């Protein structure tokens, strides 16, 4: 556990209980949280391979280097500025409908990063 995020909120949500999180990614996330200056709600942290297949997702969360954060409107803008500042290179934005979130990861891939995308 660390100061801002528990293993429980970062572990796989499928019920398997698996948990792995890259220490560098967690350090970046903590820096974002410090400067954001209010609680951050993690809607998805680590995902086991089986859960990723079940939900049809990419493997970013299985690396232990990705989170989805529930956030919207002006708070989303503030979070994005901090994510860029602290070196997150994969940023997905979903800011429509009920489930609004920002995906952050810091996976190193010279051919695909930095990269920003939006969700339908």
Image (cartoon, rainbow, N blue to C red):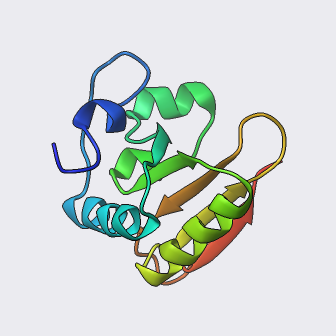
Name the foreground residue: 58 vs 34: 34
Taking 64 as reference, is 54 above or below it? Answer: above
Q: Position of residue 28 (x, y in %)?
A: 32, 68
Q: Residue furthest top?
A: 15
Q: Quadrant of residue 65?
A: bottom left
Please name the residue shown 53% across and 47% down the image: 68
Q: Position of residue 116 (x, y in %)?
A: 67, 71
Name the foreground residue: 105 vs 70: 70
The answer to whether residue 19 is left or right of residue 47 is left
The answer to whether residue 114 is left or right of residue 34 is right
Number of numbered tags placed on the structure image: 0
Name the foreground residue: 23 vs 60: 23
Q: Position of residue 33 (x, y in %)?
A: 38, 61
Please name the residue shown 72% across and 36% down the image: 99
Taking 63 as reference, is 57 above or below it? Answer: above
Q: Residue furthest front?
A: 37
Q: Is residue 1 visible?
A: yes
Please name the residue shown 44% across and 54% down the image: 38
Q: Is residue 59 visible?
A: no
The answer to whether residue 95 is left or right of residue 87 is right
Q: Position of residue 45 (x, y in %)?
A: 41, 42
Q: Point out the image quarter for the N terminus.
A: top left
Taking 3 as reference, is 84 above or below it? Answer: below
């Amino acid at each position: 556990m660390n100061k801002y995020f528990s293993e429980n909120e970062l572990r796989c949500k499928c019920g398997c209980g698996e948990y792995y999180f890259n220490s560098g990614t967690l350090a970046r996330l903590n820096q974002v949280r410090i400067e954001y200056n209010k609680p951050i709600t993690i809607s998805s942290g680590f995902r086991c391979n089986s859960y990723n297949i079940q939900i049809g997702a990419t493997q970013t969360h299985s690396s232990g280097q990705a989170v989805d954060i529930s956030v919207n409107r002006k708070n989303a803008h503030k979070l994005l500025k901090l994510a860029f500042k602290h070196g997150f290179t994969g940023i997905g934005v979903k800011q429509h409908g009920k489930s609004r979130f920002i995906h952050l990861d810091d996976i190193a891939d010279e051919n695909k990063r930095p990269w920003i995308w939006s969700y339908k």
